[in-house]
Amino acid sequence: MNLQTQIPFKKQSEHLINYQSKIFLLGSCFSENIGNKLSYYQFQSTQNPFGILFHPKAIETFITNAINKKIYSEEDLFFQNERWHCFEAHSSLSSSNEDQLLTNLNATISSAKKQVEEATHIIITLGTSWVYRFIKTDTIVANCHKIPQKKFVKKLLTIDEISESLDAIIKILINKNPTLKIIFTVSPVRHLKDGFVENQRSKSHLIAGIHALLDSVQSHIHYFPSYELMMDELRDYRFYAEDMIHPSQTAINYIWDKFVATWFSEKSQSTMQEVQTIQKGIAHKPFHINSNQHEQFLKKLAAKKDKIIHAFPFMKF
């Protein structure tokens, strides 16, 4: 008896991810989950230089500014709750020092341009269709930084608005990097602060907006069904974290395994097993740290690290 409905997957036949790939991740907190996996397995990857970006407009702004090498100034910052913030970046970049924040923003946006232009794959995870427009400047922000909600207008992006924003992102990226492959996915994290019905409306707009572009047969873009895996294959609360909103580590691992099976080359998967063996060895806590057995274990582990770093000099354990 089959007690689970499964989404059919077809392995990509070309442009597979391998250890020569340069992967750039942008988007919601689920992109952090995937990015952490890529880092663990020692891929050449960069994730969310401006922190978590939840909606398409924030991602479009970031990519546009990166490609145009925007220089941030004091006019782009504001002071709130004893810290300096920028509406275009997540609060993880905020600082108590204005000059430090400006330095970080400009250094990050400058390096992001190079990373976008050199990337082989960009993974964009969309979290929500809900956006906040700051009334004073009439601009959509990436993060509200706990400014009172009365100073914003909350709006649900239409399917057309999402498609237009994503289309702009694609054109900007492909113009600078013609061989780039862009993988879109929708975060399985539920934004229940917006409301249950509102969250479903939001996710459906994202999915429809992405597929409006896929239906136009753009060879550069692809879709990976993270949200659908969570909703259909893992439709049980045991696959959620304690907050019943975020996927559990088991669910993240499950979705990651599907992603690897679909997008990663066989050779890279073999190397991943070697990397995992080393990572587990590094994390190992010995019972007797001064024993001969542990000393031999460390020598073997060092030899494995040397061998794989010789093949892939960019790896750092």
Image (cartoon, rainbow, N blue to C red):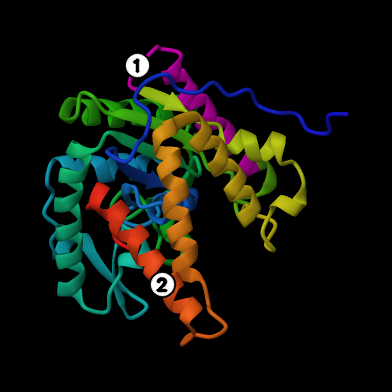
Q: Are marks 1 and 2 in contact (CB under 8 Å)?
A: no
- Quadrant of the rendered structure where residue 278 is? bottom left
Look at label 2 and name its amino acid: Leu
Q: Position of residue 240 (x, y in %)?
A: 69, 54
- Label 2 crowd bin: few (<14), some (14–19), many (20+), radius 10 Å: some
Position of residue 189 relative to residue 17, above or below, is: below
- Label 1 crowd bin: few (<14), some (14–19), many (20+), radius 10 Å: few
Which sits earlier in the primary sequence, circle 1 or circle 2? Answer: 1
Q: Position of residue 296 (x, y in %)?
A: 43, 73
Position of residue 168 relative to residue 57, above or below, is: above
The magenta-colored residue range is: 198-220
Please check the rendered image and state whether residue 19 is part of the magenta-colored stretch, yes or no: no
Which quadrant: the C terminus?
bottom left
Which quadrant: the N terminus?
top right
- Quadrant of the rendered structure where residue 91 is? bottom left
The residue positioned 46% from the left and 52% from the top of the image is: 37
Which residue is the site of mark 2? 298
Which SS class for mark 2?
helix
Foreground of the two, 7 or 154: 7
The residue positioned 56% from the left and 41% from the top of the image is: 257
Position of 66 compared to 306: left or right?
left
Which numbered marker is on residue 26?
A: none
Which residue is the site of mark 1? 219
Magenta span: chief secondary structure: helix
